[in-house]
Image (cartoon, grey):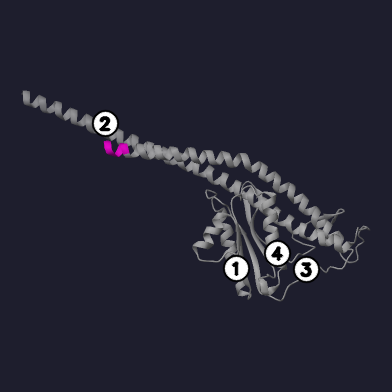
Amino acid sequence: MAGSQRALKQRIRSTETLQKIFRAMEMIAASRVGKARAAAESITTYDSAIAAAVAAVSAHTQLDHPLIKERTDTNRVAVLAVTSDRGMAGAYSASILRETERLLEQLQDEGKDPVIFVSGRRGLNYFNFRGVEVANSWIGDSDKPSEARSQEIARSLLEAFLLPADKGGVSGLYMVYTKFRSMVSQVPQVRKMLPIKVIDPDEAIQIDGMGLEDVGTSDVLPLYEFEPSAEEVLETVMPLYVESRIRTALLHAAAAELASRQNAMHSATDNAQDLITGLTREMNQARQAEITTEISEIVSGADALKETKK
């Protein structure tokens, strides 16, 4: 019995240590998720403004930009999977990797040759373990992506899209990331980033109070004057639009990761407390059983002494 109690006490102490770690991680994630959420919401506004600018310029010029054209000279397509650098975030990375695998299978069925790019150590380890070649990867700041990192990822993917087919160019870019909706809802998203769709019906972007999905050839748009020309303005704005969309996805993924980690650590803390309660009850029962046994032995010994005196 004594050995059983010592083992239970050790398990309780170990669980209490883990509970403290879980609670600390929950508090850290809770302290950071608000800022990450605000960053995601603010960049969404900027993303909408850039998209509106692209729509406005494209309405006054012929759309003849390499980022808009469909490429038919290669079957390679780039797939960027945005995962986390660390675990303890529930099914956050697993959901993204599952969606990525589904997308890769779909592209292969269509005769495409996927080229994998990864943001986050969890995704990199996943593909390395399975012997899948990764064209490029970025790790280290998945829950707080810097602007420089976002620009680096965007430049790398833009370069891959603009390269000639014989030098490894790709005909499209798909991005798999997690969209932050609320603290209890983070949804994996699969978006085609390149070639650009100037009017994206999935994103209700307003331009002078008019939804882009409602803008047709017969609608009257405001009259703009472009310096030096609409074509050169479009040449400048297009890469900014791609960078903005990628940064928006990364910031949404960061907020979703922190929210998932906070929820996972909250559940882990509660589960640890339930385990501690159960182990404490079991230890108390073992102690009571030991005390009962000792009392029984004492009573039996007293009765034996009485019998010998007789």
> Is 224 contained in the magenta span?
no
Mark 2 nearby-residue class (10 Å; few <14, some 14–19, many ≥20): few
Residue name at image x 31 percent, y 37 percent:
6
Tell me the kind of residue under disc 3: Pro
Label 4 belongs to which residue?
159
Which of disc 2 and disc 1 is earlier in sequence? 1
Which of disc 4 and disc 1 is earlier in sequence? 1
Mark 4 nearby-residue class (10 Å; few <14, some 14–19, many ≥20): some
Residue 192: % across, % down:
70, 64
Tell me the kind of residue under disc 4: Glu
- Which quadrant of the structure image shows residue 1? top left
Which region shows up in magenta? 1-6
Which of disc 2 and disc 3 is earlier in sequence? 3
Residue name at image x 27 percent, y 38 percent:
3
Numbered label attached to residue 104:
1
Disc 3 from disc 4: Cα separation: 12 Å
Residue name at image x 70 percent, y 59 percent:
155
Disc 1 from disc 2: Cα separation: 64 Å
- Which quadrant of the structure image shows residue 164? bottom right
Label 2 belongs to which residue?
291
Above or below: residue 171 compared with residue 40: below
Residue 238: % across, % down:
79, 60
Which of disc 2 and disc 4 is earlier in sequence? 4
Which of disc 3 and disc 1 is earlier in sequence? 3
Residue in front for this viewpoint, 295 or 92: 92
Residues at circles 1 and 3 in contact by the CB criterion of under 8 Å: no
Which of disc 4 and disc 3 is earlier in sequence? 3
- Mark toward the viewer: 3 or 2: 3
- Left or right, 67 with respect to 110, comes to right
Tell me the kind of residue under disc 1: Leu
Disc 3, SS: loop
